[in-house]
Amino acid sequence: MAIYSYRAVDPDSNIMVGKLSALDEGVLEKTLGMQGLTLIEAKKTAGITLSTLFQPRFREADLLNLTYMLQQIIVSGISLVNGLQDVVEGGNRKSLAPVFLSISNGVQSGRSLSEAMLERADIFPSYYVQVIRAGEISGTLEQSITYLMSYLDWQIEFKKSVRSLLVYPAVVISFMAILGVILIVFVFPALIGVLKTLTPDLPLPTRIVMAISDFVRGYFILIGFTLTGAWGAYRQLTKKPVIRRGVDNLLLKLPLAGELVNKISLSRYFKTLATLQSSGLDIQATFSTAASVVNNRELRARLTTVTEAILSGGSVGDALAATRTVPQLVVSMVSLGEKTGSIDGALARASDMFDKEVRETVKRVFAAIEPLIVICLGAMMLVILLSIFLPLYGIVGNIKGH
């Protein structure tokens, strides 16, 4: 996904300049159109340079800290320009100072806060800018920033909880891989060398392990280059939208893992919807922006049709049902909220429900993986024991026979 510098015009014929990440210029034009902007021109920004290669990565925690400091500026009552300049001159947060300087320069040149943030698409996601713009238009900027802080805090904690659940299987699988490499590259060659001097007729498990060990040791560099090349080729191929969408579609069809990816994506989608809707953003921009935060391309394409259906005059509930992705219970909740005028609460409840289901799905995935891990470890130990003790047993039998 590339970052484009663009010029667009809004419904009031004002020229908007900013940056936005998109797969290609067509997707950029469609995204801006859903936000009520008409693309005039777009230019892809430069890729990785030496200056950006060693630049520290701006994390979500940094964005949360930046949002907190921005909230303090708004709450304090001082002017936005002075507050931003005070942060820059204070220098107490070196990672945030350059970003605040960029925003400050933009605001001082006559741009709004959201317009200044548009020029730093590498820092501020689309949903973030949309919420700030909605707060500026409605005069509820402080409340919009509060919504953003709540959303960012949820997102950070949600990722932490999922990662903590992934630690155990990741450690076990890594241990198995390291143990296998050590045994094949270092341990087996020494043991088998001794066994070959004692008996020339080695059993089948030992010969298999010998063949694997000889192959890995003899072609270790070639194997490394092959794996690296395969990974690089995969990364390049998945940059093509059609191939990436096919891979993501296949991922969704995997048992358990596909269910987990689907629910994690829907949890983020509905949380973003609830945040944007509560901040006062119009329903068109709300659903188009929320779809853009979904990483799975296949799921994103399905959820993008929700925005198109709404623009065509359809209901939100029917549009969600047509994706064949959202559970019927959630569709019913949203439909009822739409009819009663409480869609904000329905979206928030849907997000909470998916949060709970993600944790339960992760536990079910691990419950299915644990037996497989035990079986793999048992198979590895069985091969080790057979390849070592069978020839020793034969040697001892020959000694007793003599």
Image (cartoon, helix red, strand yellow):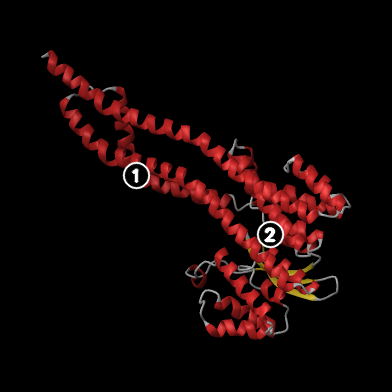
Mark 1 lies on residue = 220
Residue 339 against residue 135 in the figure, above or below:
above
Residue 331 bears which disc, if any?
none
Lateral position of residue 292 relative to residue 373, left or right: right
Q: Nearer the viewer, residue 234 or 277?
A: 277
Q: Residue furthest left?
A: 402
Q: Quadrant of the N terminus?
A: bottom right
Tell me where residue 46 appears, x and y as whole percent: 59, 69
Q: Residue lying farthest right?
A: 313
Q: Residue at x 33, y 28 (%)?
A: 383
Going from N to C along the chain, the mark reached first, 1 or 2, is: 2
Q: Position of residue 160 (x, y in %)?
A: 54, 54
Q: Residues within 10 Å of mark 2 (few under 14, many from 20)?
A: some
Above/below status of 329 relative to 201: below
Q: Which residue bears the numbered disc 2?
A: 24
Q: Which secondary structure, mark 1?
A: helix
Choose between 145 and 77: the one closer to the eye.
77
In this rendering, position of residue 309 left or right of residue 121 = right
**Can residue 21 be seen?**
yes
Which amino acid is tagged 2? Asp
- What is the x, y in percent for residue 84? 62, 82
The answer to whether residue 202 shows anywhere in this view is no
The vertical placement of 170 against 384, above or below, is below
Give the position of the C terminus as an image quadrant: top left
Q: Amino acid at mark 1?
A: Phe
Q: Real-space Cα distance between discs 1 and 2?
A: 40 Å
Q: Quadrant of residue 15?
A: bottom right
* Residue at x-position 47% and y-position 35%: 370
Tell me if residue 360 comes above or below residue 307 in the rendering. above
Horizontal side of 151 relative to 305 (left or right) equals left
Give the residue drawn at x 16%, y 29%.
197
